[in-house]
């Protein structure tokens, strides 16, 4: 048994306990009510980095939530790995759909996690995956095998657009200089088949408000004679897709780089069962853009989804009212080379243009980010693949993910370095959903695999 | 000054105080949280009827909220008037749009009520208008001028479909036998121009639930590949109207009796300013079915309005989620001879038929009611018009209202008698909306007009 494995074996209970203590902190960045918990979580991460042996750890103030920064330089001649993660989490609602309280972590076995999984908001996204790096670092320090320099940058606004991180990165290019950026905030195909995410979708997120009459009206006395903002909103949203589920916003697809036939064939090789997919979601059929497969629809194609909608009476029973206002939160996933700001502007112009004179429309941009692709001949990718191959016994499959980590594109622009996305979560881990969890196997496997990446990356870097 | 006027003059402060005490009770029937207040309101109404001198008053239990029944028979040879009203009110939300707490009544002057109006939920709909009848009865008792028999039936489920009332009426035809039914739960054109509602729209109210995946999903990992129930719901709702705002449900218009050219010309005579209408609602334009005027759209034409919609993340900030479920409350206003149960079934069949295989749809009927029309040659109408002419100095204009009082059609079917709708509210009284109010002038004018109806109806009845 390798020294790393032995160390993990002897300390795994503590590793799990420490993660659980982090998961108990409800660091929901989207809701100001949790502001103090967000700050407490930043402090907790700092303390754990100190304990792990990181030389210099600091809490960096920003216009928003603080960033935990750690630095351990052993030799300027050696390469530097910048580890990024986030300590903030998604809101837990709908709270009533959780089988156990989102911030009282428990360990349960599940179909995909026979060895047990930790159930809590943020277990997989991203506290669990972020903390693997802290423990991997502890191991290399204890075993005195750290082969290179390392920097940690753990932020608290990933779930709300990383605005302060952008502010921070632009002001600290020197401090953050590195040779590769390492992130675990994605998933892999299965516990038997690791994969490395080589592509991410971009994001444009907007909130829309439709105003009809200046007050709620009796639907009997006014129904049929005035524009009902909810009816109008449904009409406007519905019109954003055509009968083939193409998005109808003029110019939306102009900059989309179509995937090559070769790439689509390569993608099609990834193991995938449509039946299993439908069964897992309990749906009779999938639904999406004509002419593309399910795996293409959620990775290489842009989308437009309503993430929330509300208006009028939503309480118990019946209220015959015409609301004055109706609202929706709408996000668009983008692919190379769509520009998020440009797409947001196209959406705004189009949405305002299709509103009938009988209503007023307001479009408020939330946040966005560019799509990203990592070339698989990059030594970072090669090192990661070698590490996975050693710990899982099979090489990783390169995968395009439908998710967005806007800051990856930001890093490339500001820090001029590539990002390697070593994700250890599973699609079934229900991130952003009730009952989010992270497999104990995955957590420990990540801690075991990361030090190998350090070793192989340093070797390849020095030999190139 | 007439004896009635003198009596009102001497007692108007008490009349207002008593109404205010009723308005302080939050008898919201749509929300079980207010159940005790609903019961307390029924008791209060009973006590006031007792005090007014009504011989026999009782609280009648039903499967739902109790019905307050009062009876004062002076001579079997004289006609009997059945007064109907309701003591329950609409929910107060959106609570934050009220200028004063909905259940802490205050009196304020307003543009349409220079003499002041009582602001509270239920002030006009229907506690204020219902209580006019109790006070009018008190006056006739005190002045010993009651010319006929009277029965009171005040229910507590009008705002949620009057199910228990239907149960009660079907079981008490004998007890409720009468020669005319008198209701004040509608409006009039203005304080200078009274009107009598001769038509009401029917109602079909349904709640729909669209289910996509069995859990909330990450919109990045699944976006574009699975049916988003909110997007689907908007598509389905939008498809319920065509480009002319005709309703697309097959068979929806089959039984609609088109208004005659003459009737439409008669309606067009009612004073109406589109500019004032738009200004009052702060809208740039009206919106509705092609080929009909605003007054036609909200009275003689059926409609389909979304009264509430919700799904996904509606909190602060951004959450990139695909919801598992989306919901809407939808009401259809009906005209003669549309049958509410048939329309509800047509809606259900159609809505289920247009759902893509990728989602499951559930349609739950809430409640409904038939449309109704009163012929203006009816002696009840004649007596009411004579009473208005005397107290307002001008005859009333017959009007078709867009609202629904489903029980009016029920009364005709079960009790075989016509209903006279003597409404004293104004459209601007904001019933079902924040800041509902009822003019002090209107309240006292109603109390003054009602005894005259009793007198003229009895005369015409005996002379016919």
Image (cartoon, coloured by chain):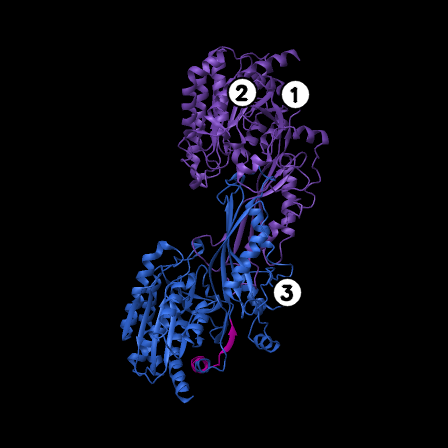
Chain colours: A blue, B purple
Which disc number belongs to residue B378?
A: 1
Q: The disc numbered 1 marks a residue on which chain?
A: B
Q: The disc numbered 2 marks a residue on which chain?
A: B
Residue A10 in view: no
Q: The disc numbered 3 marks a residue on which chain?
A: A
User: Residue at label 2?
Assistant: B151
- In the image, B55 versus B434, the foreground residue is B434
Residue A107 in view: yes
Identify the mark nearer the N-term, 1 or 2: 2
**Mark 3 burial class by Cα count in 10 Å: few <14, some 14-19, many 20+:** few
Q: What is the x, y in percent for residue A187?
A: 46, 70
* Quadrant assignment, res A386: bottom left
- The magenta region covers A384-400
Q: What is the x, y in percent for residue A298?
A: 55, 67
Q: Single out the residue that lies furthest toward the right.
A: B261
- In the image, A140 versus B306, the foreground residue is B306
User: Residue at label 3?
Assistant: A290
Q: What is the x, y in percent for residue B61?
A: 49, 29
Q: What is the x, y in percent for residue B106?
A: 40, 30
- In the image, B159 versus B244, the foreground residue is B244
Of marks 3 and 2, the one in the foreground: 3
The C terminus of chain B appears in which quarter of the rendering?
top right
State left or right for residue B208 relative to residue A133: right
């Amino acid at each position: 048994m390798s020294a790393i494995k032995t160390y993990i074996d002897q300390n795994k209970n503590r590793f799990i306990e420490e993660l659980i203590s982090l998961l108990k902190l409800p660091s929901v960045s989207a809701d100001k009510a949790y502001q103090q918990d967000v700050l407490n979580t930043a402090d907790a991460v700092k303390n754990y980095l100190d304990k792990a042996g990181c030389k210099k750890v600091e809490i960096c103030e920003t216009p928003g939530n603080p960033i935990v920064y750690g630095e351990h330089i052993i030799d300027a001649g050696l390469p530097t790995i910048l580890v990024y993660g986030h300590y903030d989490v998604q809101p837990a609602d709908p709270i009533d759909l959780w089988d156990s309280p989102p911030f009282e972590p428990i360990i349960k076995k599940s179909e995909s996690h026979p060895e047990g999984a930790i159930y809590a908001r943020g277990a997989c996204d991203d506290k669990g995956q972020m903390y693997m790096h802290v423990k991997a670092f502890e191991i290399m320090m204890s075993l005195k095998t750290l082969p290179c320099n390392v920097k940690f940058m753990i932020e608290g606004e990933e779930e709300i657009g990383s605005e302060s991180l952008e502010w921070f990165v632009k002001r600290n290019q020197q401090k953050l200089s590195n040779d590769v950026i390492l992130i675990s905030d994605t998933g892999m195909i299965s516990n038997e088949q690791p994969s490395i995410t080589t592509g991410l979708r971009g994001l444009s997120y907007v909130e829309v408000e439709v105003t009809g009459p200046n007050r709620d009206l009796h639907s009997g006395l006014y129904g049929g004679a005035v524009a009902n903002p909810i009816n109008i909103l449904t009409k406007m949203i519905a019109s954003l897709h055509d009968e083939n589920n193409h998005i109808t916003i003029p110019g939306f697809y102009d900059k989309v780089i179509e995937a090559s036939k070769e790439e689509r064939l390569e993608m099609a090789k990834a193991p995938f069962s449509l039946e299993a997919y439908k069964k897992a979601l309990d749906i009779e059929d999938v639904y999406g853009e004509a002419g593309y497969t399910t795996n293409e629809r959620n990775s290489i194609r842009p989308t437009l989804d309503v993430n929330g909608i509300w208006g009028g009476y939503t309480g118990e029973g019946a209220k015959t009212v015409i609301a004055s206002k109706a609202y929706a939160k709408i996000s668009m996933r983008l692919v190379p080379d769509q520009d998020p700001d440009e797409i947001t502007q196209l959406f705004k112009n189009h949405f305002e243009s299709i509103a009938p004179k009988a209503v007023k429309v307001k479009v408020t941009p939330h946040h966005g980010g560019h799509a990203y692709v990592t070339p698989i001949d990059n030594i970072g990718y090669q090192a990661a693949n070698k590490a996975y191959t050693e710990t899982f016994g099979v090489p990783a499959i390169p995968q395009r993910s439908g998710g967005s980590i806007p800051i990856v594109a930001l890093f490339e622009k500001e820090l001029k370095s590539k990002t390697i996305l070593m994700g250890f979560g599973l699609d079934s881990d229900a991130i952003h959903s009730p009952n989010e969890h992270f497999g104990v196997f995955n957590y420990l496997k990540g801690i075991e695999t990361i030090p190998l990446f350090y070793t192989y990356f340093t070797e390849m870097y020095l030999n190139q």
